[in-house]
Image: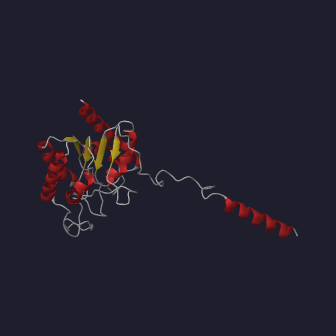
């Protein structure tokens, strides 16, 4: 009888647990595991800001939005389902997609970057199928990168927005999936800076900002950053945008 009583108590306990909400007794997700929400309610009284860039800019977008809360509505392109951020990739995709990203909205500030995808090695130029082979071409070589960038700058200038170009961030040694060489970003930045200076576009030098503190901010053998690294980038980006908004008000 004692055994049967214990068995019944066990069954009652299991039944109680099954009736609990799914979240009960679970450890909260760590910040790295939490799925961020890209939905937000823009304030029509505030200026609209657009961030264009690859996964590095995706990493700092939500922090920039938080830092500029009450000062600007911070947008970036979203995937077709609207549930996640679109990777703007390299200048090849930029030339094809910029009109869609700009839409009909009147932008006060556009902060943009292209580079890390352009300089990665791919199976065929212009395509996104990345490789780890140094003999394979880059998605856009320096000549094509500069040509594409001039097209993008012309369209961006036509918006009337205040423009900020962010230099391409560093590549950590040993980054090979896909292959990117650490010495190449400065070459692409130099080509871009020549175009930006001619067009009188402000530079946000994220490369120089990151380079002295890479060991603290960037993941090893990678182009991506730690959470602290993305927060640091967000502060640099938000501060620059805030200065441009102040200039626009004048």
Picture colour scheme: secondary structure
Q: Nearer the viewer, residue 180 or 122?
A: 122
Residue at 17% of width from left, 46% of height from top?
158
Q: Position of residue 198 (x, y in %)?
A: 11, 43
| Observer-nearest of 50 and 237 | 50
Residue 19 quadrant: bottom right
Q: Position of residue 95 (x, y in %)?
A: 19, 57
* Quadrant housing residue 163: top left
Residue at the location (31% across, 57% down)? Answer: 87
Residue 182 visible in the shown view: no
Q: Residue at x 39, y 36 (%)?
A: 70
The answer to which quarter of the image holds residue 197 is: top left
- Looking at the image, residue 5 sits to the left or right of residue 119; the answer is right
Quarter of the image for the C terminus: give it. top left
How many marks on residues?
0
Please state which of residues 42 and 35 is positioned toward the viewer in this rendering. Answer: 42
Q: What percent of the width, then of the height, locates residue 7?
A: 79, 68
Q: Residue at x 32, y 52 (%)?
A: 56
As drawn, 135 above or below 205: below
Quadrant in the picture for the N terminus: bottom right
């Amino acid at each position: 009888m004692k055994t049967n009583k214990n068995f019944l108590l066990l069954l009652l306990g299991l039944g109680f647990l099954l009736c609990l909400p799914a979240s009960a007794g679970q450890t909260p997700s760590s910040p790295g595991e939490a799925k961020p929400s890209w939905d937000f309610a823009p304030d029509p009284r505030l200026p609209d800001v657009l961030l264009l860039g690859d996964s590095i800019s995706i990493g700092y977008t939500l922090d920039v939005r938080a830092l500029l809360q009450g000062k600007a509505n911070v947008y970036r392109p979203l995937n077709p389902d609207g549930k996640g951020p679109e990777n703007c990739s390299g200048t090849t995709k930029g030339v094809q997609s910029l009109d869609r990203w700009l839409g009909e909205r009147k932008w006060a500030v556009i902060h943009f970057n292209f580079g890390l995808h352009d300089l990665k090695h791919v199976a065929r130029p212009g395509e996104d199928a990345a490789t780890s082979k140094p003999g394979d071409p880059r998605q856009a070589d320096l000549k094509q990168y500069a040509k594409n960038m001039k097209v993008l700058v012309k369209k961006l200038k036509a918006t009337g927005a205040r423009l900020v170009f962010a230099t391409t961030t560093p590549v950590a040694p040993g980054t090979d999936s896909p292959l990117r060489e650490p010495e190449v970003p400065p070459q692409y930045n130099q080509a871009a800076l020549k175009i930006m200076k001619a067009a009188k576009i402000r530079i946000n030098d994220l490369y120089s900002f990151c380079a002295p503190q890479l060991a603290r901010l960037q993941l090893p053998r990678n182009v991506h950053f730690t959470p602290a690294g993305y927060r640091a980038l967000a502060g640099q980006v938000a501060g620059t945008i805030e200065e441009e908004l102040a200039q626009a008000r004048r």
